């Protein structure tokens, strides 16, 4: 049973470019969560999605960041016009039901470096 | 969400029990205590959670004080692979999906 998959594992972008991070949840999971971890800090919640719905995006920066989880295919976290401060590890997690106290299973992360 | 306080770092010898404390003095009655860990460069891994009773699973035990103001995660027989940052997280049921990770405790298991 494959775990949460994220790709790419490492992504390098120049300032002003776009970054697309992909997350495939565990089989049977329909709820996805994105977190960001800056160097030497704990993870920060960004957004919670169900298939085709954004449930909670309270942790997303107001500009340049967007997320989707289409009916088919992986969840995508998109960062437009990247800046150096976007350099971080981005983790995706999934859960089966989205119920209260559902355990979240995390992927290995995508490390974004902005030059 | 209630704030948690954990020691910055700890160490223990391989094969011995590792006891990781967490203070959550402002915890509310409907808030749970979760523990996750993050091994270097990997995604966080769920360990255990509880409300007020002590809990045990194949990975660890969670001891919550009667007043619920603190808890201790116990790894009964630490191995080198348990070296990681351990996060104590307090969250209410209706927002339990929004995990708030603090700085955690960096546990080093010595050979």
Image (cartoon, rainbow, N blue to C red):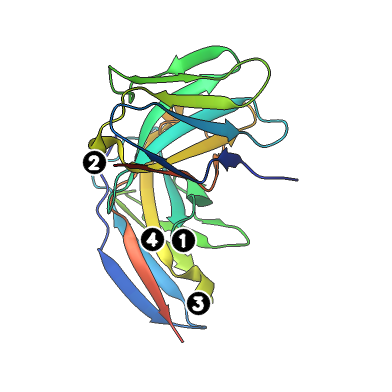
Number of the label disc, if any, that sits on residue B26: 2
Quarter of the image that includes the N terminus of chain B: top left
Mark 2 and mark 3 lie on one chain; the one further toward the N terminus is 2
Number of the label disc, if any, that sits on residue B80: 3
In x, y percent, where is residue A67?
46, 20
Real-space Cα distance between discs 4 and 2? 23 Å
Mark 1 and mark 3 lie on one chain; the one further toward the N terminus is 1
Which residue is labeled 1 in the image?
B39
Front one among B78 and B26? B78
Mark 4 and mark 1 lie on one chain; the one further toward the N terminus is 1
Real-space Cα distance between discs 2 and 1? 28 Å
SS at mark 3? helix
Which residue is labeled 4 in the image?
B85
Q: Is residue B17 above or below residue B97?
A: below
Mark 4 and mark 2 lie on one chain; the one further toward the N terminus is 2
In x, y percent, where is residue A29?
66, 30
- Tag 1 subunit: B
Mark nearest the camera among 4 and 2 is 4
In x, y percent, where is residue B95?
42, 27
Real-space Cα distance between discs 4 and 1? 6 Å
Residue A108 falls left or right of residue B102:
right
Cβ–Cβ under 8 Å for marks 2 and 3:
no
């Amino acid at each position: 049973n494959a775990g949460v998959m994220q790709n790419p594992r490492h992504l390098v972008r120049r300032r002003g470019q776009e970054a697309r991070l992909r997350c495939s949840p565990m089989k049977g999971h329909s709820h996805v969560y994105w977190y960001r971890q800056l160097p030497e800090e704990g993870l920060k919640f960004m957004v919670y999605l169900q298939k085709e719905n954004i449930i909670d995006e309270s942790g997303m920066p107001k500009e340049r960041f967007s997320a989707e989880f289409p009916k088919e295919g992986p969840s995508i976290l998109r960062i437009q016009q990247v800046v150096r401060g976007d350099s971080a590890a981005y983790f995706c997690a999934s859960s089966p039901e989205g119920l209260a106290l559902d355990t979240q299973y995390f992927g290995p992360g995508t490390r974004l470096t902005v030059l | 969400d209630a704030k948690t306080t954990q020691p910055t770092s700890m160490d223990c010898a391989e094969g011995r029990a590792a006891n990781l404390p967490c203070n959550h003095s402002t915890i509310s009655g409907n808030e749970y205590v979760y523990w996750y860990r993050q091994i270097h460069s990997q995604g966080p891994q769920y360990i255990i959670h509880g409300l007020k009773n002590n809990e045990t699973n194949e990975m660890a035990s969670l001891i919550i004080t009667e007043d619920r103001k603190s808890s201790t995660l116990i790894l009964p027989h630490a191995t080198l692979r348990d070296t990681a940052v351990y996060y104590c997280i307090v969250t209410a049921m209706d927002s339990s999906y929004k995990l708030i990770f603090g700085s955690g405790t960096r546990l080093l298991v010595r050979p």
